[in-house]
Structure formats: C-alpha cells, structure tokens
Amino acid sequence: MKKRVLAAVTAVATLAISQAASAADWYRAETEHFIVYSEDSEDDTKEFAQDLERLDEVLSLLTGVSADETELPESSKVSVFRFGETSDMSALAAGNRNTGIGGFFIGRANGSVAFVPRQRNKRRDRSLRQSVDEDVMLEPKAVLFHEYVHYFMFQHRDAPYPLWYSEGFAELFSNVEFNEDNFVIGDVPTWRSISLATIPIDLEKTFDPPAQPDRYTTGRTYAHGWLLASHLTLNPDRRGQMTEYMNAIGSGATRMEAAERAFGDLDVLRAELEEFRQGRARTLRVPYAANADPEVDIRRLTDAQAARMELMVKSKRGVDEDEAPRLVRDARRLVEQYPQSPAVLLSAAEAEFDARNYAEAESLASRVLELDPNSTEAANYYADVALRRSYEDPSMLTEARTRFAAANRMETDHAYPLYGYYLTYLFDEGEPVPDSAKAALEASFRYAPFDQSVRRSVVHMLLEEDRPAEARIVGASYLSGSGGYSCMLNKMFDQYNEGNRQPLLDEVEPDHPGKYLDEAAREAESDATEARIAEYGCEVD
C-alpha cells in the first residue's frame, strides 16, 4: 500500500525509534484535520495540535479557500508522529543521524503521515556541526508547517507551481507566529538568513534553473523563493501577479516569457527584491477567523497502543525487503502479548503485508474486523491482499473488487478503496474498465491529489480515452520539471498528438502492485529508463 524506502534505513533507525518510543507517555490528539501521536505531556501535545489546526485556518484565509472546500473526508486527516530529537528524524528518513533532515511528510491515498521531532538535538558534536547545512537549525514545528503547506496546496490549489514558488510559499508559512487572537506571517526564516545575505539575486537562474544545479541552486530555491513568495503575497502592488504567471505558463509561454508578462520589467522586480532583503521584514498580522481555540480530542494511549508505537512509526515510514522481516518478528511478539488489541493486530497486519506474508496479513485484518467492524484500514488491507495475489492468480481480481467495494461502503469518501476498485478492472484483461470504475478513480483523485500513483493512473486513463489535453493538465507536475524524465515525457506527448500513442501509454501505465522487484531488477529498470531518456535526446539526470 505504499512505496518502500531505500535499504539505507537500517539499524540506526531501529535504535532511534526504540529509544524514543519507549521513553515517556504517548498521547493521541485529534482535531478537524489532524491526528497527532505525541510522546510528550498532555498540555504540550494539545497546544501542538491546536497550532497545526490554526495553520490550516491561516492557509485557508490567505489562499481564499472556502469553508466548503476545507470539509475533507475523515481519511484525509494527516497522522503526525512527534517524538525524539532532530537527529532521530534523520535516522528515520535516511538511516543517518547527520543528514540534517528535521522531519518529513509522505502523502498517500491510504493515509498521509508526517514525522517531526519533539525538540531540537540536545547536543551537537563537532562532526555534526561540520557535516550539515543551515537547515539543521530549523525549528521542529517549522519542518512540519513547511511540508503541510505542500499538502494543503495539493488538496485545494493543485497546479504545477514552479519549484521556487512552491518551496518559497511553504517557507513563508514555516515560521508563522500564533498569538492569542491573531497570527503573523512574513518574518525572515532564520535558517535561510545566510543564503539571503550571501547569494546574489539572479532572477533568470531562479525562474529558469540550469539543468545541472550549482552551489547556489538550493539557496535560490528556498531563500530567494521565500523572498519572491513574500513579495508577491504581501506587497499589495504585486498581488495577483502569480496567477498571471501561471496562466502564461499554461498558455505555452517559456518561464522567462511568463515572468516578464506577469511581473513586468524584471530589473524593477530585482531592485525591489534587493531593497526588500536589505530592509526590514514585511509582516502581516491577521485576526483569527474563529476566536475560540480549535477543538482537540486528546487521550493517553493504552498500554497496548503505546507498545505498538515503535512498530507503527517504522511501518508508516515505510520499510524495505531487509527490514520487513525484522518488523514481523516484533509484530508477532506484540500479538502474543496483546492478542485482543485491534491497534496491535492492525499494526501487525501491516508488518506482515509489508513482508509479503499475505496469508498472515489477511488473517490479522480479518481478526481486526471482528473486533472493530468499522476499521476501514483493516478492510483496505483485507482487500489489498487479494489485489496483490491477483498478480499471480488473476481470478483473485473479482474477490479484490468485492472487498474494495465493501471497504468503500464503510467510508464512501476514502480515496484508497476507490483507487483499488479501479485497479481491479484495469488489470483484468478480459474485462473493459466500466464507467463506474473510472468514476471511482476520479473521486479518488479528488480526495488524494497528492498521491502520485493515483495521479499517474488518472493520466493513463485520460490518454486511453484519447483526452491528451486533460492528461497534460493532470500530469503537469511531471512535465514542468527541467530533468531528463520530464523532457522525455514532453516528447512522448508530442508523439502521441502526432498519432504514435503507444510509447506514452506504456510509460505512464500503472504497475501492478503485486509485482515485486528485487534490488537487481530495480537497477535494471532504472537503467532501462535512463536508456529511454537518452534515446529521446534528453539529458540523463
């Protein structure tokens, strides 16, 4: 049900999580848009959850998202895991405590998750100070705020924003200040101050980055992106110009043509930005839309629920083929200790599923449904087992379809059962995809536009229906990059419009989730993709 991370996530991450997850009390706090699992005090957990909910309110106000648009399904709530120190996040994400990763976010149709430390590192030795960049100084909450902005924009304002704006806009909200009756945005992110002070403003390299990044690319993307996003958002004379820029891009203008059309004389813009970065920050103070504190349902986890947190964190982060069997051993010990806990059984089902022990995963999901008949997550695993098995046994597609339909009846606006239902027809070679399945995929995309597997499936479906213009719009994020793969896809789209449809259809066709690629097969597939990119005359990244 999710992509696996690289094999670099090994024993370092295991040690980090086991130390963090066994330390103190765990609390579960639920708000309108978030579910927070926090290893902290009840008061601090509640305040953290309220700040997240305030962030959603701030984004709605500043982007013009209406109350109707914010009424997302229950399944769209982001699960936030908050524990440990910054170095624990590095270990969890990359298996290396010294990467400087301060937290991360993964958007999935079956449940988006975020991981953020409770506090900064208490101690930083000399090797760490020398090995990481300025981002290690990010406040733990700032990382999550930054990533949630991306998620929010996918949900409500989905568009192929250029990287400088996407990251700059997220930085604008990363250090939002919450006061008793108002919020303040626009302060300079201290972790970008070095880049702001030392990197020369070069609008051409910011708007149209070179194919090969240089030593200033990251600074231009994030620090100068913040400078531009702040200027375009908070300067009344510039508001609305970003919409003009996106419209120009959509009409076929190059990045520089679009910039000149939307922003006017770029020398004037450059002078304004120079003045901006050398002067005081331009802040905006806005009263809250609702004066009452956001509602939070908070409770301490039971012994069984707390015992599974280490397993849950690792599984939700994602495991590889080496780590999956180790988690199964941990999961089976927990099941022996807490055989009647739906939470433990559900985490154990996920661990068995990740290890491709489908019989065990199916049995555990079935037991969860006996104890908790309303568990959509268990119903999804129960259905997904049948879908995975259909790769070897196509007759299982009918059973998978029945199970996904049952999961959909439990929660009709959950993205994953709708997506799974569509796949059961897509992979059924003897059965055309009916309109009902296509409608299910479209609904899944509305609920989870941030899930790239769902988005890619929509692109493929539109191309199969010979609707390339709409496919380009949905797939714009794949096409607007400067890398070799984007270059190849654009040329394939041109071929498609000229009548040679098959190369593009083959490229975007969804893979069967039951197909397993070992390390050698993954490398061979990567080599084949690079060869295709080169064949199209595009530069391999």
Image (spheres, rainbow, N blue to C red):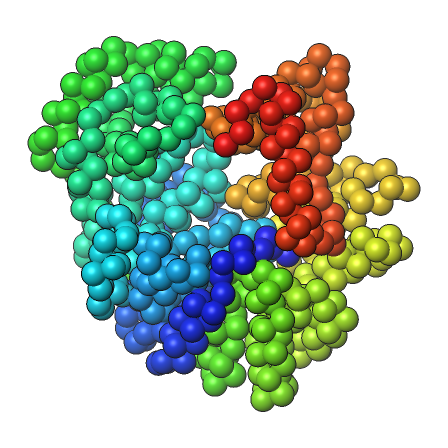
Question: Is residue 198 left or right of 338 when viewed as pictured?
Answer: left
Question: Is residue 493 left or right of 239 when viewed as pictured?
Answer: right
Image quarter for residue 406? bottom right
Q: Is residue 432 above or below residue 243?
A: below
Image quarter for residue 510? top right
Q: Is residue 118 above or below residue 335?
A: above
Q: Residue at x 38, y 35 (%)?
A: 166
Residue 440, given in percent of the width and then of the height, sits at 70, 44
Foreground residue, 190 or 300? 190
Question: Is residue 341 left or right of 253 when viewed as pictured?
Answer: right
Count of labels shown?
A: 0
Image quarter for residue 446? top right
Q: Residue at x 74, y 62 (%)?
A: 385
Toward the bottom, the furthest residue is 337
Foreground residue, 23 or 454? 23
Residue 521, given in percent of the width and then of the height, sits at 69, 48
Residue 327, given in percent of the width and then of the height, sits at 58, 73
Q: Is residue 87 above or below residue 71?
A: below
Q: Is residue 506 above or below residue 487?
A: below
Foreground residue, 341 or 17? 17
User: Does residue 61 appear in this view?
Assistant: no
Residue 303, given in percent of the width and then of the height, sits at 47, 85
Q: Quadrant of the N terminus?
A: bottom right
User: Does residue 24 appear in this view?
Assistant: yes
Q: Residue at x 22, y 67 (%)?
A: 123
Q: Residue at x 62, y 40 (%)?
A: 526
Question: Is residue 287 left or right of 63 when viewed as pictured?
Answer: left
